[in-house]
Amino acid sequence: MLLTSCGVLFSACNKEDKLNSNSVFVDSTIPKNALDNYLYKNYILPYNVEILYKYVDKESDMSYRLVPAPFESSIRLSKLMLYLVMEPYSEVTGGKEFLKNNFPKLITFTGSAPIQTNGVMILGTAESGTKVALYNLLELNETSGKNPAFLTTRFFKTVHHEFQHILNQNKPYPSNFKEITGTGYVEDDWNAKYPANATGIGAAIAAGFISPYASKADTEDFAELYSFYVTRSQADFDAMLNVENSTAAGRALILSKLAIVKNYMKSEWGIDMDLLRANILARYPNLSTFDQTTLN
Amino acid sequence: MKFKLFILGITILSLSASCEKKMDRIFEESPSDRLNASVANVYSTLQANKDGWIIKYFPSSGLEFGGYTLFAKFNNTTDVSIEGDFTTLAAQASTYTVAPGAGAILTFDTYNRIFHYFALPAVFNRDPAYQLPGFITPAAGIGASNEGMKGENDFLVTKASADSIVMEGRKSYNKVVMVPIKSSEASTIVATYRAALTKFHAFSNYKFEVGTESLAATFANTTTKRALLIAGNTKPYSYRYTPTGLEFYTEYDVNGVKFRELKYVEPTGAYTKGYFTNDAGTIKLVPQS
């Protein structure tokens, strides 16, 4: 009886055809243009970063009405990001490895920006530290592309901010950071508590937050401090701290947190934030003659 | 006993397990091959007509902004140029892709000032930088601040042949029909549509006349016009201007008279502005001013 059972088990069936060597998934080929080649050479090969400048619905946010980025603006932003973000990090860290290992892997470009039902515009978003969405490329042209304040607020501060989140996920920052203004974080109440007007912004500084958004959570606070600091001159940063309604006590809290951010970047990642900032700032004057459109 | 039962169980299980027969395919090619063939067919159909295509475009699932005629030339596998009856702006070039998804999906994937105007939230469409010459330019913009005219970027192609391409908006599910432009009309078609628009768009204060009845109709959106609401109805009757009159989004019904197209008849007698009517003459759409 036992033998019969075993026999039946082993006989089973054995008439599997040879597997077809062709995959059932056949990729369609899409012809490459000059920008595709530029992105491959300047982003994918050196940094393993993909830029999606064409609208792809599944990478977009379906809950908003969004239009694609203009092709020409995508060329400008690709070149400007290389100059104002990628190159400074590479020069300060002495190579491309740091970005290749840590930088967000996917950057999407969109022409318009998500508008919430209350009319408020979203400037940039990030998902789990791997994908960063940059909006408002409709506004990027020859003139605005020479304006460091525009480029920083609209695009690059967001990039540095989201990049910092990834760094924090890989190596946590010291826990004493969140103790400094520990009871002040208000989660989603941040824009109600500190509205985006002179009073609200001043009140945020007085409470020890570099921006209203920094009051959301310690992770956001950390990324806000970092991204504001490296994209602004000391004079501009000081001006932020000294707005109307700010207080010396609030400034002191911000500066003690900033010291932790600087120390973290230096000890964990070997990046001197002052050197990085100097490198970025030194590029701003060159924007007036920077070639935004030639692809090479 | 327990052991014997166990053996018996195993035996029965082994017998019934047996072997799974390979499923026969309903189609000869793999799903991926067929999808790619359908994508390739859309690419070649779009490019085959050198004089381009008329796109009958109705943004928004509510159809409240009416319909527009676009003229598109798919110059190669990536570049498209687009003109519209509603703006005097010269043809705008941008790119397109046909990608495999739930079928072949046509995406206008880089910004085209004419085509994507419909998808701009009012925060943008009220900004003169994005408005189109010849088209309405209300200071408050058109539609809601976060949605605008609710146009879109992606269309699922449900039919592609030399005589027509039928698509479905991926967000609105609105039907979008494309018909080929004939070479004999290619040089004049845009001007002809624009002239018709100038003539018919001036009309307002409409009344439907069916039999002895007269039904007043207002515009669903007074800024864009192109969609009529009969008193008491919530669903607008949405139309585009054509050289012969009005072509509606779908077949509509007023008091039992069904119509899809109403042709313009020049002013006569009491009809000082002329009127639009069907072939049988059983319904009249009369502009009062």
Image: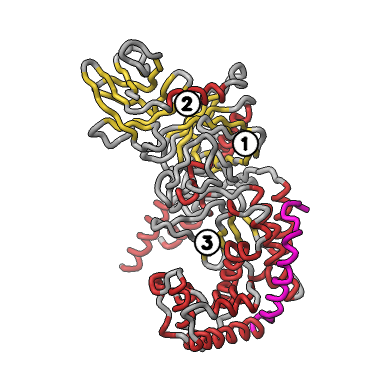
The reply to whether callout 2 and callout 3 are in contact (CB within 8 Å) is no
Q: Is residue A74 left or right of residue A224?
A: right
The circle on residue B80 is 1
Label 2: chain? Answer: B
- Highlighted magenta segment, given as a residue range: A268-296
The circle on residue B278 is none
Cα gap from disc 2 to disc 3, whole angstroms: 38 Å
Which image quarter holds the N terminus of chain A? bottom left
Instruction: Provide the major secondary structure of the magenta segment.
Output: helix
Q: Mark 1 vs mark 2: same chain?
A: yes
Helix, strand or loop under label 1: strand
**Foreground tag (2 vs 3):** 2
Which amino acid type corresponds to the residue marked 2 in the rendered image?
Leu
Residue A222 in percent (x, y) is at 54, 78
Residue placed most toward the observer, A164 or B280: B280
Viewer can see residue A175:
no
Work out whether A247 lies above or below B169. below
Residue located at (61% from left, 48% from top):
A70
Q: Is residue B49 left or right of residue B117?
A: right
Helix, strand or loop under label 2: helix
Residue placed most toward the observer, B53 or A73: A73
* Residue bearing mark 3: A123
Label 1: chain? Answer: B
Label 3: chain? Answer: A
Helix, strand or loop under label 3: loop
Q: Residues within 10 Å of mark 3 (few under 14, many from 20)?
A: some
Residue B237 in percent (x, y) is at 34, 30
Residue placed most toward the observer, A273 or A250: A250
Q: Residues within 10 Å of mark 2 (few under 14, many from 20)?
A: many
Q: Is residue B25 magenta?
A: no
Q: Mark 2 vs mark 3: same chain?
A: no
* Residue bearing mark 2: B197
